[in-house]
Structures are given as structure tokens and as C-alpha cells.
Amino acid sequence: MAKRISSAAGFEAAILQAVKENINETLAGEVTDISKRIIQESIDTVVYGAYSPKHYGRRMDGGLRGEGGLSPSVGDMKLTIEHDVVGNPYKRTFNGGSVSYEPWPDSPHQVSDLSGMIIQGYSHPVGGPYSASRPYMDYAEEQAVNNGEIKAAIIKGLSNIGLK
């Protein structure tokens, strides 16, 4: 049964609620998908595109670029995507012609926060090739604001309920 609205304020509130619900649905669906892709493209450009060693891309699809670390949440017409990726718990050691794997020494940077290490820049030894900060989330936000895809998706979502 349809809800009866008996005042202009009630009508305005009902319209605003419908718009909010539609925007939240659009954010949770198409806009989240677009945002994840933009973040992955940003990682390709800002992180993987900055280095030439082949070993750097070895975890590209399951590590930093994988969707497992992307955690979207939607509320009150706002989309937030956290990117928390756990690093590899083992370090590779090259000794002559052999490679060994051993746990990293106790350090919060080594295992628990790969995305933070990349954004802030971290390398062992200090001054190594990965020391430079790679702020890929800032770049992704800039791309999301400037490329128009997200705005178009929100407009499309609003047009689905008859608003132009």
C-alpha cells in the first residue's frame, strides 16, 4: 500500500529519502565497481609502473592489486573504500645460486601493512629502490573525481527513479 503524504514537508522528506536510498544503492553497486577498477589502474600506474625489476610484479593479482584488500562501505550517500593488504610473511634471501625463504624479523611494517608500506615508502636496506612514497590512493581519488565515470553512474542511478 502506498504511503499517504499529507504535507509539503512530508512530500519533500519522502523525495529526499528516495534520492538518498537510490544514491546509496548506486554507490554500493556500479560506483563501487568503477572505484575498485580506478584503484587497480592507479596501482598499475603509480606503483608497478614506477619500477622495472620483474620480481616486483610477482604478486600483482593476488597482492596489492587483488580485490581482497579493497573493503567498500556505503552510508549516508558516501562511499568509502579502505585498502588494507597484508604483506608476504616470508622474505627471500639470495645466497649464491640458491634462494631461501625465512620469516621477516618482528616488525609491524614487514607483514601487516603492505599497502601502508607502499604509500609511505619503505625499503630494506634504507634507501633501496622501494623507499620512495607511492601514494596510489591519492592518485585514484584524483582520477575518480576527474574522469566523469562516477558522476555519470550517479546521474544514471537518479534517472532510474525519474529524476533528471
Image: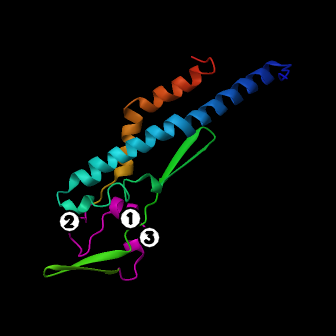
Residue hosting label 1: 114
Labels 2 and 3 touching (C-beta < 8 A): no
Residue beneath the point at 79% across and 18% down: 8
Q: Amino acid at mark 2?
A: Pro
Q: Name the outermost residue toward the front.
A: 98
- Expressed as whole percent of the image width and height from the top left, the position of residue 32 reads 50, 41
Give the SS element for disc 3.
loop
Figure quadrant of residue 162: top right
Which of 44/60 is in front?
A: 60
Mark 1 nearby-residue class (10 Å; few <14, some 14–19, many ≥20)? many
Say if 11 sits above or below 88 in the image: above
Residue at left offset 30%, top offset 68%: 122
Q: CA distance from mark 1 to mark 2?
A: 16 Å
Where residue 147 appears, as percent x and y from the top left, is: 37, 32
In front: label 2 or label 3: 3
* Mark 2 nearby-residue class (10 Å; few <14, some 14–19, many ≥20): some
Residue under label 3, please give it.
112
Which of disc 3 and disc 2 is earlier in sequence? 3
Horizontal placement of 164 versus 38: left or right? right
Residue 94 lies, in percent from the top left, at 19, 78
Question: Which circle marks residue 129 in the picture?
Answer: 2
